Amino acid sequence: MAQIIVAFIAIFLLSVSAVDLPEFLHVCNRNDPNINTCISESVMHIRPYLVEGVPDYNIPSLEPLLLKELVASESQNGIRISGNNVKAYGASDFTVGRMMVDMDKLEFDFDIHLPHLYFVGEYEIDGKVLLLPIRGNGQMYGNITGVIGSVIFKATSDPDDAGVRQFRIIDFKLKVTVADGNLKLDNLFGGDGIIGDVINNAINSNFDTFIRELMPSVESALGRAFEDIASGIVRVFTFDQLFPN
């Protein structure tokens, strides 16, 4: 989701700039009374290019998303599952939902919808399921559906030391929700298929609990990543370049 949000912001900022833009970017004027619709259409127009990314404009590829680490805990039973080297597929199939832009206050409020993400990676598990102690590692597979990333951020256009107005993000909030999902962990109990299926079913019966435990740490990490990368993207442009009159 971090890469999705970064790509979205890069497209968003470039779509309203009239300076040195490639032909595939749709331009929106900052005084357009329908700027919300214009920006949403701009993002959807460039979506096919996000499969491979646009390196010249710091827009990353969305296929696959590379996730360094995921940690899910279910506190009631003391189960902890950590995932490493996770790759997620399906991020380029996003759509833009709610979009609210206030150019006077430089406040931006929007949703990104993802119908389906499929991911693979390596896992480690520690805890108990059905009173059975479990400790192990192997390959992890998963599906997540109905993902919504809701973003609210605020920016300034204060001048730099040379008196040139610059666009800077000063506050960022991200909320992620997931409708449903499931996990499959291979190699449980040395690859015993019957016991492995029982454990996987028990884990998935509490999937909502795992997601609730996971979200705070995910949102915090994504927030930091977003601010670092998005700030790097906008730093090379002045405010008037990003938002021409």
Image: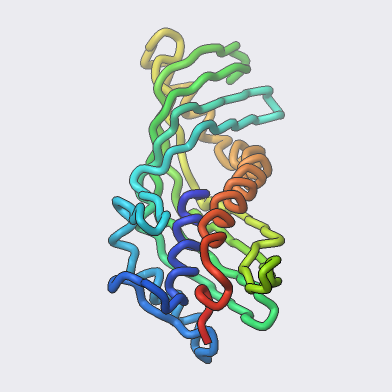
Q: Tell me if residue 27 comes above or below residue 135 in the rendering.
A: below
Task: Kindly give the residue lying farthest to the top in the view shown.
Answer: 190
Q: Is residue 201 left or right of residue 77?
A: left
Q: Quadrant of residue 101?
A: bottom right
Task: Kindly give the residue lying farthest to the front in the view shown.
Answer: 162
**Residue drawn 40% across and 47% down?**
117
Q: Quadrant of residue 76?
A: top right
**Residue drawn 55% across and 38% down?**
207
The spot of residue 155 in percent (x, y) is: 67, 68
**Which sits in the foreground, 231 or 174?**
231
Task: Kindly give the residue lying farthest to the bottom in the view shown.
Answer: 33
The spot of residue 17 in percent (x, y) is: 45, 75
**Which sits in the foreground, 33 or 104?**
104
Q: Tell me if residue 36 comes above or below residue 96 in the rendering.
A: below
How many tags in the picture?
0
- On the question of residue 45 being in view, the answer is no
The spot of residue 92 in percent (x, y) is: 35, 55
The spot of residue 61 in percent (x, y) is: 36, 49
Q: Is residue 41 left or right of residue 204?
A: left
**Which sits in the foreground, 124 or 159?**
159
Q: Quadrant of residue 216?
A: top right
**Residue drawn 35% across and 56% down?**
56
Q: What is the image's colouring? A: rainbow
**Residue drawn 42% across and 17% down?**
138
- On the question of residue 204 being in view, the answer is yes
